[in-house]
Amino acid sequence: MDKDLLKKIVVQIKKYKLTNYFDTKEGFINWFKSLSKKELDNFLSLDVDVNEVEEIQINDLLINKDLLKCSDYIDRVKAILTLKNGEGCYHLYDYLCNPIFLNSKDFYSDIEMISKATTSRYGLWLINDPVFINSPYHTEDMKLVVESEGIVATALAELAANPASIKSKYHEEDMKFVSTLPSNKVQSINSYPRDCANMLAHNIDSLNDNYHLENMKILANSDYASKYLYKIMTDPNIINGKYYREEVEALNNAKSKNKALGIYYYIANPERKFRSDYDSQYDSQYDYSNVRISEFELISPKNEEDYLEGLLSINEADEDFCLHYVALLMNKEFINSVYKEFDLDLIKNIHNRKILLDLYSLMIDINSVNSLYHENDALIISKENDDEKRNLLMKKATEDLNLYNINHEFDMNYISSLDMKNMDRNIYTEIAYYLFNKDGINDLKHIEKLNKLSEGIMVRRTEDLTDFFDNIEEYDSIDELDHKNSKSILVRLFNKHKK
């Protein structure tokens, strides 16, 4: 070992305060022995301001083997010393000695741009990424990054190193567009849910979409629907669908978060819907009177002729009924119901939330939509403001035993006419017996007894054979005498009606 050479090396080590960077004596000796003549000469010829080295904390970089190998070692060190903007990110300075960056033709120009930024953080991120180093947009992208700050600079740096974006035809325009966005309109690639325009520039499906640039602008200006717009703008099934642009427009025009969620469900029909969102977001905000959204038999309405009409109608639905309305439009029973058009017209002009929720339950009820009485029942219920009476009407309009009885229409009108507030409770008990008990429903003097009860006159429940024969002429056939068969008669009539 050359003693004089060793002394010179030690002088440099002490000068630049590098003694602490060697753990042991053997470590220093091994490092010294590993140096080539070129590397030794580079280090010995170093003569820069020690205070500057300490100020930006690059002491250890001076003995970095990859940096020492460079023929322009001194110039590179001087270039690195121009970085006075590394507060809080000195740990990233190691990237300056990344062989990929050291071999880059843009080494000096990158450092010059980074040194002029508010912080060197974002530029240092980029020089450690081989995708960015080899990007054909390298210089213009670095310029955009160092001229930006905060989350916008982060978003630009992430995009500048994204292979899919670089390969796409939209990279330059996307970078320029993202650089103009306010900080609340961009997000980091690792944040969720993804709902900002810069996220579209990372997505391959969006980058293959002819409407990509238009979508970037739409998403950047969206208020309520951003995360749902992102979902449909990156879903290839929707992108390639028949109504793609109408769906984007409808969602973008959503008047509230509630309606944006409903429109998204209507468009995408995701596997998980209503229950999780409804429980977490809406239970505490709205009183839905325990009328839960039914997730049973929900299907995509896209094959229906009135799909677009339904899509637009969601935005006009009552705010507190919106999700139920969407669930109605997606309900298999409702979609196939002969009463669908009637039902939709009916609920358009109703703004009482409780009535709407009862009508929702009625319109998806398999018994009601397969009965002859659905339209009339819906009309009666829609006009009833008394909650207690409406509960009785709903029971009458949806239960199998009540629907297939020849006195059904009378019973519905009868319930509507009742004065519940001033009714004697004993009378009420008897009325309930004739309206909802099997024997009371099938009583041959059903109507007569209910009329007497409404006048406050008590009647006996049992019926003797004289009553039976007194009323037998009211029936057209022996089948109608057997109330067990009354359902089958009405079903046959209804099937004929549907045809």
Image (cartoon, rainbow, N blue to C red):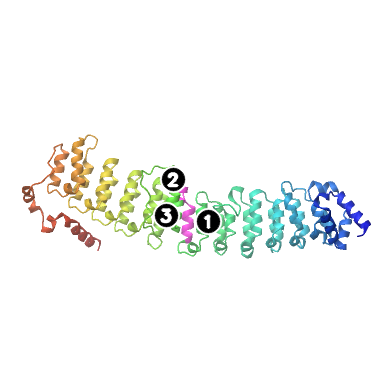
Which percent across, then down, holds residue 222? 53, 51
Which percent across, then down, holds residue 348? 35, 49
- Mark 3 crowdedness (10 Å alpha carbons): few <14, some 14-19, many ≥20: some
Give amino acid for label 1.
Tyr
* Closer to us: 404 or 375: 404
Picture disc at residue 282: 2
Q: State the extent of the magenta-drawn residues as a range.
A: 244-260
* Closer to us: 484 or 1: 1
Question: In this orientation, does residue 19 appear?
Answer: yes
- Mark 2 crowdedness (10 Å alpha carbons): few <14, some 14-19, many ≥20: some
| Residue bearing mark 3 | 312
Q: Quadrant of the C terminus?
A: bottom left
| Residue bearing mark 1 | 230
**What's the CA distance linking mark 3 and mark 1?**
19 Å
Q: Secondary structure at mark 2?
A: helix
Query: Which of the two labelled residues, at mark 3 and mark 1, occupies the earlier sequence position?
Result: 1
* Closer to us: 486 or 66: 66
Which percent across, then down, holds residue 293? 38, 50
